[in-house]
Every structure is written in structure tokens, then in C-alpha cells.
């Protein structure tokens, strides 16, 4: 973790630990999200986040979205974190036979293996966007060399090719799925997603039907962001915390709808800035192009 203002976090963290110890010492249950004040005060948020922090410390490495933390806005003293967020679509020997862009969106399997090998050889550890969120909140440290891997559109290759390779490398990733197409030809099924979630992968929403959300009605916008979140929660048992804008298209109305639906983050297809508390609904990613020379891949993460 390389927070911009780490020292300023220490008093808050110490206070948090003190509160947690006092509560634990008194034998009281930590408050869940429903016990938060709900008035948006920072003390209410910290209580929810503290519960997750404690759970993470007790249960080892935190890797699951905890509703208590991930349904709360970031505290005011949240800090930026430096985590490369890589964007993939398809990983396969050949592009899927669909759409004019599939070829440019398909990283070939041997290249993907080489990229994962590079990350392993250079000490990178995958983290989830939830981990990054908690790091911004000052509630957990990230590994020295963190990286977030994301996959858009829910292609069957994600399950058949990428998933086994990720497991072999001990990596996790976030899969953004289009819920209406789950289970259709060439796409992952709900059973696939269930299995991947159980193996530590994060399953998040890329809308119901992948429209340009800036051009749909308010009602359609609401259902695209909310219904997809609900469908995924049915198989994961946890509320989605990060949304992926279809075609990377968004505007203030779309951001407001995503926020209203309960997400605390959203990713774009824009590239480049560090993860900042000021732009959690405009998280940039770095596209991993097909046939990328390894020297170029190295520059994406280093
Ligand atoms: Zn997409």
C-alpha cells in the first residue's frame, strides 16, 4: 500500500483499534450496517467499516465484499491508492465468432499465461476492488505490489480459459457480467459464476443488457443497474459494490443512478489515474491489448 498521506491515517487507525478492542473486551457484538446511525455521519460509517476490518483481521486476508463496509461512502479522510487496474475481455486461442471488435478484445491464451507468469515472477498479488476501497478508507494495507484484474462481458472463455489459469497462479479477478446474456450461447452460465465466486472471484454487474446508458430512459437506467445487481446477489449472497459502465459510457445522470442503486464504485474504460476517493465512480483501467509485447505489459503494471 502506498497511500499519499499514510501518516495522517495512523491516529484514526489507532483510535479505531482502540474502539474495536473495547467492544471486543466488553463481549459485545459489533454493530452491523443496520445499527449504523444512517444519518451519514462519519462515526456511523466508521462503525460499519470497523466491523469488516475486525473480521478481516480474524479471518486472514479479506477478499469478500462485506455489506457493512461496501455499502458506505468513503470517510472524508480517505486516501488515494496506487493499484493498476487491468481490463481484459476475452482470453482464448482465437477470438469468439461475434461482433466486429472481438478480435481486438481477445488476448491469446499463450500471451495471457506469459502475463500471469510475469506478475508472479515480479511479486505482484491480485487484490479486489473491495480491497482497494478498504485501503482508501484506511482500514487495510494492500500488498507491496497489488494489481486488480478485470474481465468484461462474461464470455465463456472467461470460465474455460482464464479462470483455470488464474487459479493455477493463485490469482483472483473481477468478472463484469451482462445478466440478461448469462447462460446464452458463448456466455458463462450462473453455475459457472457460482463456482468462480466460490473460488474467490468477484462477480459484478455490467448491466442487464449492455446499452449505452446515457441514451436510455430513467426507468430503463434504473432497471439496468438495479436488476443486474439483484440477479448477481441471488447467486453470490452479497450486494454488488462495483458497476462497470457498458461501452465505458456514462454521464452525471448515469453516475447518480449507479450510486442510488447501492454501488460504491464504478469502472470506466478510460485509462490512467490512481484510485482516488474523489473519483470512485470513474475508476480508470488499463486495457491489455492483444499481442502486447511483454516489455509493454510490464510498463502497464510497473
Ligand atoms: Zn462491455
Image (spheres, grey):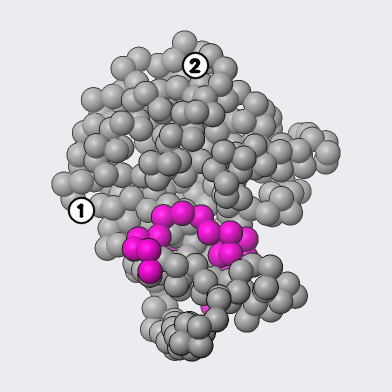
Q: Which residues are magenta?
A: 58-82
Mark 2 element type: loop
Residue 19, visible in the rendered structure: no
Tell me if the residue at label 2 has its CB under 8 Å from ligand 1: no
- The secondary structure making up most of the magenta span is loop
Using residue 201 as the reference point, say whether residue 244 is left or right of it: right
Q: Report crowding for label 1: few under 14, some 14 to 19, many 20 or more residues within 10 A (C-alpha).
A: few
Quadrant housing residue 109? top left
Residue in view at x 52 percent, y 71 percent = 51
Disc assigned to residue 186: 2
Residue 8 on image: x %, y %: 44, 84
Residue 218, visible in the rendered structure: yes
Looking at the image, residue 98 lies above or below residue 177 = above
Residue in view at x 53 percent, y 14 percent = 185
Which sits in the foreground, 40 or 268?
40
Q: Report crowding for label 2: few under 14, some 14 to 19, many 20 or more residues within 10 A (C-alpha).
A: some
Q: Is residue 74 magenta?
A: yes
Mark 1 element type: loop
Mark sitting earlier along the chain (2/1) = 1
Residue 286 on image: x %, y %: 42, 43
Instruction: Check whether the beta carbons of the residues at disc 2 and disc 1 lie within 8 A of each other.
Output: no
Which sits in the foreground, 289 or 147?
147
Residue 141 on image: x %, y %: 36, 68
Q: Is residue 67 magenta?
A: yes
Residue 129 on image: x %, y %: 47, 53
Residue in view at x 51 percent, y 55 percent = 65
Find disc 1 in the rendering and name its residue: 123
Looking at the image, residue 199 lies above or below residue 16 = above
- Number of numbered discs present? 2
Using residue 12 as the reference point, say whether residue 282 is left or right of it: right
Amino acid at each position: 500500500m502506498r497511500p499519499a498521506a499514510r501518516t495522517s491515517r495512523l491516529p484514526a487507525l489507532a483510535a479505531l483499534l482502540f474502539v474495536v478492542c473495547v467492544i471486543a473486551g466488553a463481549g459485545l457484538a459489533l454493530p452491523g450496517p443496520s445499527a449504523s446511525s444512517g444519518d451519514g455521519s462519519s462515526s456511523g460509517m466508521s462503525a460499519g467499516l470497523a466491523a469488516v476490518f475486525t473480521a478481516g483481521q480474524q479471518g486472514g486476508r479479506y477478499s469478500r465484499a462485506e455489506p457493512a463496509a461496501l455499502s458506505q461512502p468513503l470517510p472524508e479522510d480517505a486516501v488515494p491508492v496506487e493499484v493498476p487496474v487491468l481490463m481484459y475481455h476475452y482470453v482464448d486461442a482465437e477470438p469468439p465468432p461475434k461482433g466486429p471488435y472481438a478480435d481486438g478484445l481477445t488476448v491469446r491464451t499463450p500471451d495471457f499465461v506469459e502475463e500471469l507468469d510475469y506478475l508472479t515472477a515480479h511479486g505482484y498479488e491480485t487484490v479486489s476492488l473491495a480491497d482497494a476501497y478498504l485501503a482508501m478508507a484506511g482500514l487495510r494495507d494492500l500488498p507491496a505490489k497489488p494489481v486488480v484484474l478485470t474481465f468484461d462481458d462474461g464470455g465463456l472463455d472467461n470460465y474455460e480459459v482464464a479462470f483455470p489459469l488464474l487459479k493455477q497462479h493463485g490469482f483472483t479477478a473481477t468478472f463484469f457480467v451482462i445478466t440478461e446474456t448469462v447462460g446464452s450461447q458463448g456466455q458463462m452460465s450462473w453455475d459457472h459464476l457460482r463456482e468462480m465466486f466460490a473460488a474467490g472471484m468477484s462477480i459484478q454487474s455490467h448491466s442487464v443488457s449492455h446499452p449505452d446508458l446515457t441514451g436510455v430512459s430513467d426507468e430503463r437506467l434504473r432497471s439496468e443497474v438495479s436488476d443486474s445487481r439483484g440477479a448477481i446477489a441471488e447467486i453470490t449472497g452479497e450486494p454488488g459494490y462495483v458497476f462497470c459502465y457498458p461501452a465505458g459510457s456514462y454521464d452525471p445522470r448515469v453516475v447518480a443512478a449507479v450510486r442510488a442503486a447501492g454501488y460504491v464504485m464504478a469502472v470506466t474504460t478510460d485509462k490512467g489515474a490512481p484510485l482516488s476517493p474523489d473519483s470512485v465512480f470513474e475508476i480508470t483501467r488499463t486495457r491489455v491489448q492483444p499481442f502486447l509485447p511483454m516489455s509493454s505489459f510490464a510498463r502497464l503494471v510497473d
